[in-house]
Amino acid sequence: MNQLWPFLIFSLVASITPGPTNVLVLGQSARYGLRQAVPLVVLGGAAAASMIVLVGFGLGEVAHWAPALRVALTWGGAWWLSVMAVQLWRAADMQLSTAQVGKPVAGWQAAALQLINPKSWVMALTVTSVFGHAGALWQLALLFWLLSMPCMGLWAALGSAAQRMLPSARAMGWFNRTMAVLLLASTWIAIL
């Protein structure tokens, strides 16, 4: 692993920059608290790391040889994330009580999000083509996961801080609308 430092830097940048998962983690902790964001951080990071192994062992080739599948995943994922953004926008005027805001996102949903998240696919394809070879995929995936958790944890901490700083329904409404716009932007910028 003579490319350890470049890989770690790449993983840090990929994990800490805005994207659908980080926006989801931020919004979850802002609405429900830091504890409710932990499953998203752990399982979302684990799923993204698992994609490194899956792509390295051939899933990337399937996407290469079946372009219709890739297109379907891309547009299906963009549609699903757009629906989430619209729901977040519409929820902007709800009161802050948990009963009225709805259910928090489950950890498995954050893990499933990685399969349709364009940023996760680009990350996995980059890691396997630039840094990976079959013998190191598991180590790279583990390192990515261990590095991604504190990065997403930072987003969760920001959301938790926003929860304390946005005590009114109106302030939380603006926050939710901002998160909806960021979710849409992070989705569509990656595609277009």
Image (cartoon, rainbow, N blue to C red):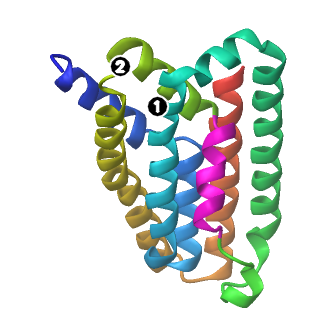
Tell me where residue 115 sits by quadrant.
top right
At a point 65% along the width and 50% down the height, the residue shown is 112
At a point 71% along the width and 78% down the height, the residue shown is 103
SS under mark 1: helix
Residue 129, position as x, y percentages in the image? 43, 13
83 w.r.t. 15: above or below: below
Residue 164, position as x, y percentages in the image? 45, 79
Find disc 2 in the rendering and name its residue.
132
**Disc 1 to disc 2: CB gap under 8 Å:** yes
Q: Dot 1: within a 10 Å radius of its alpha carbon, few (fewer than 14), some, or many (20 or more) residues? A: many
Tell me where residue 14 sits by quadrant.
top left
In the image, taking residue 27 as reference, residue 14 lies left or right, namely: left
Find disc 1 in the rendering and name its residue.
52
Q: Is residue 140 magenta?
A: no
In the image, taking residue 156 as reference, residue 113 lies left or right, namely: right
At a point 62% along the width and 72% down the height, the residue shown is 172
Kindly give the residue lying farthest to the top in the view shown: 65
Instruction: Give the mark nearest the N terminus, 1 or 2.
Output: 1
Residues shaded magenta: 105-117
191 w.r.t. 171: above or below: above
At a point 52% along the width and 47% down the height, the residue shown is 47
- Mark 1 belongs to which amino acid? Ile
- Mark 2 belongs to which amino acid? Gly
Most foreground residue, 40 or 180? 40
Give the main secondary structure of the magenta stretch. Answer: helix
Most foreground residue, 97 or 128? 128
